[in-house]
Image (cartoon, rainbow, N blue to C red):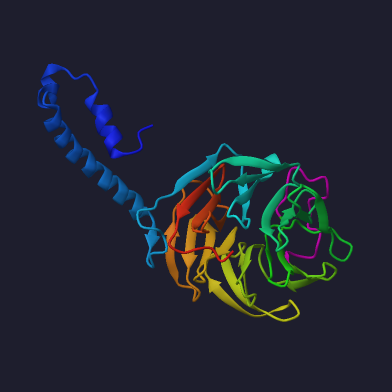
Amino acid sequence: MITNKDQFIEKFLRIDLNPASSFMLNNKSFGKVLLSILVTTVFIFHSLALNAQIMDEKSIVADGASLELLGDGFEFTEGPAPDEQGNVYFTDQPNNEILKWNASTGEVSVFMDEAGRSNGMFFDDQGNLITCADMKNQLWSIGMDGKVEVLVDNYKGKRLNGPNDLWIHPNGGIYFTDPLYERDYWERDPEMQQDGQHVYYLGPDRSRLIRVEEDLMQPNGIIGTPEGKKLYVAGIGDDKTYVYDINEDGTLSNRKLFAELGSDGITIDNEGNIYLTGEGVTVFDSEGEKIAHVPVDKDWTANVCFGGLDRDVLFITAMDSVFGLKMNVRGAY
């Protein structure tokens, strides 16, 4: 594979040309200069074309960075979550796997199969991977040894619709969304199990499960601020994202419209910018102003997080692939 301008020039100069087209290259140095000018021009315009696709008003994307394919050949990628070392765990839900992208080597390996059809994920402060296990509509805690603990399997005696995405508060409490997306692998009744699609909060002691929002159209992506004061939840059914104040008891108040855009997954950076997914990745500042858009050449961009050794790689799951984009900002998590 030719990856840079110099490789292209050297390869071109090794091509056997007919006399009519090669007379200028008989003097190899002269030909190389001309070709270098031509190829440099082409590479500049190609780079400008790539960067022109990324709208970035606040320079949050690293200079010259473009979307990099980190892995492909999956069926549908979701739920990216970074560990303390910056490795990113993500799911291939149709194949029932959780995979790991190694931040040091770039290698992708299988962390767990028979993964409960996990969807959204987040690491707790003990290093356990908390997942929305959609197979039986549960919330799981997975240790790095692969041991599974079921944290939630019902609400008031009834099965959940299908936990989709989650965020863990600094106090250890877990917020998660519970929309309804019928799955062909369900052995249960595919109809709505609860009386609607809601947002739930599991207290730090893992014994108190309450509803904290009952008035969203298909709640999906969810993220909170690092200090634990604000919660962002996407109502993908009406294509809107809302922000709430988080109260001491875990309940929510002061709901406000944050953006006229829904989202499948959400993340936040160290400057408080909010990243929404769907048609690529769209970024809003903390006031709800659109500041960037990263197009992804896939039918759907499902989820996003920050990974890498310095937490400055925007890790994107989209259909059968995962991508990375070098950033000037870092993830809040």
Is 190 magenta? The answer is: yes
Is the stretch drawn in magenta largely helix, strand or loop?
Answer: loop
Please tell me which residue lies in front, 302 or 1.
Answer: 1
Is 270 magenta? The answer is: no
How many numbered markers are drawn? 0
Q: Is residue 262 visible?
A: no
Give residue 36's quadrant in the image.
Answer: top left
Instruction: Give the answer, above or below, for where 90 lies relative to 11.
Output: below
**Residue 7 pos. (x, y %):** 30, 33
* Residue found 49% across the figure and 50% down from its top: 324
* Residue found 21% across the figure and 44% down from its top: 41
**Residue 295 pos. (x, y %):** 44, 53
* Residue found 38% across the figure and 64% down from its top: 59
Q: Does 14 sit left or right of 312 as displayed?
A: left
Please tell me which residue lies in front, 301 or 18.
Answer: 18
* Residue found 82% across the figure and 54% down from its top: 149
Give residue 201's quadrant in the image.
Answer: bottom right
Please tell me which residue lies in front, 324 or 276.
Answer: 324
**Residue 135 pos. (x, y %):** 77, 48
Q: Does 276 sit left or right of 182 as displayed?
A: left
**Residue 244 pos. (x, y %):** 63, 77
**Which residues, given as a range, are shown in magenta?**
181-199
Please tell me which residue lies in front, 269 or 20.
Answer: 269
Q: Does 168 sit left or right of 294 as displayed?
A: right
Q: Does 51 sit left or right of 288 as displayed?
A: left
Picture quarter with the C terminus: bottom right
